[in-house]
Amino acid sequence: MGMRKLAVLVFAAMFGTLSFVSPAGAAPSGGLSPAPVNESILVPDYTEMLWSLAGSQSEEEIDRIANSGHKVQLLVDPEAGKILAAIDTESTITPSALTPVGPGCSTTSLCMLNGVPNGYTGTGTLYGTWSNVYQYATGDKIGTFRFGGLDWTHNPYTTVNLPTPEKITYIARR
């Protein structure tokens, strides 16, 4: 599926212009024919974040987010008749508000050790690749670290030692 088609589906699901069939697989009577989309409306673009979550969220988590009544972003597979990923944009931390300390860490920064200390201050989320991380710390805020297909969220001033080095692909602070 092309990214433009996906953006149209996310937009349509977000603003209710898409009739979604039941998961039983019944075909929609009129087919999908959303109106042309003004791409400037789709800012910020959560597509990359949604694709990174696909396959890592449980159906229960997706249902909870999709039915929260908040502003949400969904990644849908119309052929399968299911939602692949969901983000609650009302309670999601603002993307890219983290600032590198670096190189290095402070006692109050989020910190990941993989031979080089990778520190971040501020609040927000950041996608990246930090390979061979054997220890991480939250600093003075709640921190989330994604590895092994799971998000690990810890209270402030928590240090985690990993038995085997991991590749972290997402961090967040709030």
Image (cartoon, rainbow, N blue to C red):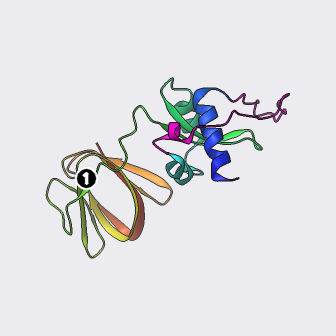
Residue 144 vertical position relative to residue 168 in the rendered view, above or below: above
Region of the chain picked out in magenta, as a range: 18-45
Horizontal and vertical percent position of residue 92: 40, 38
Quarter of the picture containing the C terminus is top left
Horizontal and vertical percent position of residue 84: 63, 44
Q: Tag 1, which secondary structure?
A: loop
Left or right of 172 on screen, residue 3: right
Please name whichever residue, 25 or 96, is drawn nearer the observer in this view of the structure. 96
Left or right of 111 on screen, residue 130: right
Magenta stretch prevailing secondary structure: loop
Left or right of 68 on screen, residue 80: right
Please name whichever residue, 73 or 119, is drawn nearer the observer in this view of the structure. 73
Residue at 56% from the left image edge and 52% from the top image edge: 51
Q: Residue furthest left?
A: 107
Which amino acid lies under the numbered mark 1 shown in the image of this protein? Thr
Does the stretch in magenta take in 143?
no
Residue 16 vertical position relative to residue 44 in the rendered view, above or below: above
Horizontal and vertical percent position of residue 71: 48, 29
Residue 40 vertical position relative to residue 122 in the rendered view, above or below: above
Q: Quadrant of residue 19?
A: top right
Q: Residue furthest top?
A: 69
Does the stretch in magenta take in 43?
yes
- Residue 144 appearing in the image: no
Which residue is disc 1 drawn over?
Answer: 138
Residue at 64% from the left image edge and 46% from the top image edge: 6
- Residue 21 appearing in the image: yes
